[in-house]
Amino acid sequence: MVTVLKPGVTEDQIENLCNWFRTRGLDVHISRGHYQTIIGLIGDTKKVDVELLESLDIIEAVKTISEPFKNANRKFHPDDTVIDVNGVKIGGGNFVFIAGPCSVESEAQIIEVAQKVKAAGAHILRGGAFKPRTSPYDFQGLKDEGINLLLEAKKETGLPIITEIMNANHLPLFDDVDIIQVGARNMQNFDLLKELGRIKKPILLKRGLANNLKEFLMSAEYIMAGGNENIILCERGIRTFETYTRNTLDISAVPMLHELSHLPVVVDPSHSGGMARLVKPLSLSAAAAGADGLMIEVHNDPKNALCDGAQSLTPEQFSDVAERVRKVIEVAKQ
């Protein structure tokens, strides 16, 4: 349930109303927009007399929320959420490029890639330290050493870093990581999501391989219910009957998620298609659909990459994609 307040309501009136809600065992979420203030209620709202609320002078409207996700719901928070990562803003009309290798392989590799993607316009450096692989015999990442190398690349370039977490026990290793990524396979690892809800660090949550948008947003809700509202949603393609591509990019998810939620939405075109030649058209499509950013795999030597070389761009190819995407964004704003 959300309560929309009339313009001009004082802070004392808001606090008194919130205290009244709390005495009825409800959690209160206040959203202050440009034109109106909304109080969201979480809990058993059957205890609230809607007719009484509607009769109050400070109340403009009372609306129920039928969807199970409350904190992530746009009805709860009409304005776009903007995530600030060391001065890099994601959402609310700010477009970001997140770029880097699938896996951190060496200090020379990650620093070279970081320098080149920054020169091409990347805002955030990605790189896998812990790698969830389908085969137990594939390269599993450098783990804590990989995080240390990402931090070295951050020192060299100033780019904030993002890397994937596999286990809540690893959280102390992520103290200096700017954004923690939850991969598709862990989208419904609810114990992990609960732990991430207890910290304030931005979380990039990837959609599961076979999950619908409601399930996706409910996973975001798990994190937000713990108090962490710094969530970035990532559409990375879903598994369908198609076999020519690694996954199927659900481009319709971008405008749909923006309609349902206030959280920023980025797209991963690398995992969606699974082939480097598909990254450009998928990136352009995502930008035209209203995505808040792109997460692109870039490697300085894709043919010899230890992980996902087939879908990785060279730094030069990334520069070309970024330039073309910026043109699409300019057209889309008109």
Image (cartoon, rainbow, N blue to C red):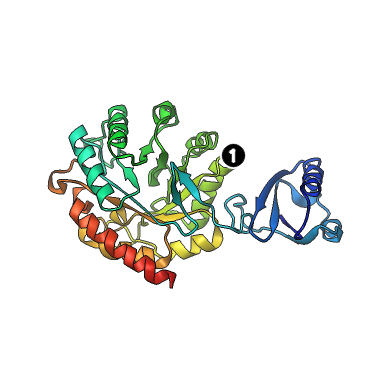
Q: In this view, does 38 lie to the left or right of 93?
A: right
Q: In this view, does 137 lie to the left or right of 70?
A: left
Q: Which quarter shows the N terminus? A: bottom right
Counting labels gives 1
- Residue under pointer 1: 227
Q: Which quarter shows the C terminus? A: bottom left
Residue drawn at x 43%, y 64% as measured from the top left = 290
Q: Position of residue 48 (x, y in %)?
A: 81, 51
For label 1, the SS is loop
Amino acid type, callout 1:
Gly
Q: Which residue lies furthest to the bottom in this view?
A: 334
Residue drawn at x 41%, y 32% as measured from the top left = 167
Q: Judge by depth and name the residue closer to the eye, 101 or 309.
A: 101
Q: Judge by depth and name the residue closer to the eye, 260 or 97.
A: 97
Q: Judge by depth and name the residue closer to the eye, 258 or 124.
A: 124
Residue drawn at x 81%, y 40% as measured from the top left = 23
Q: Where is residue 24 in the image (x, y as percent from the top left)?
A: 80, 43
Q: Judge by depth and name the residue closer to the eye, 186 or 127.
A: 127
Please indicate, yes or no, whether residue 33 appears anywhere in the rendered image: yes
Q: Position of residue 74 (x, y in %)?
A: 59, 58
Q: In this view, does 182 lie to the left or right of 72?
A: left
Q: Is residue 279 left or right of residue 65?
A: left
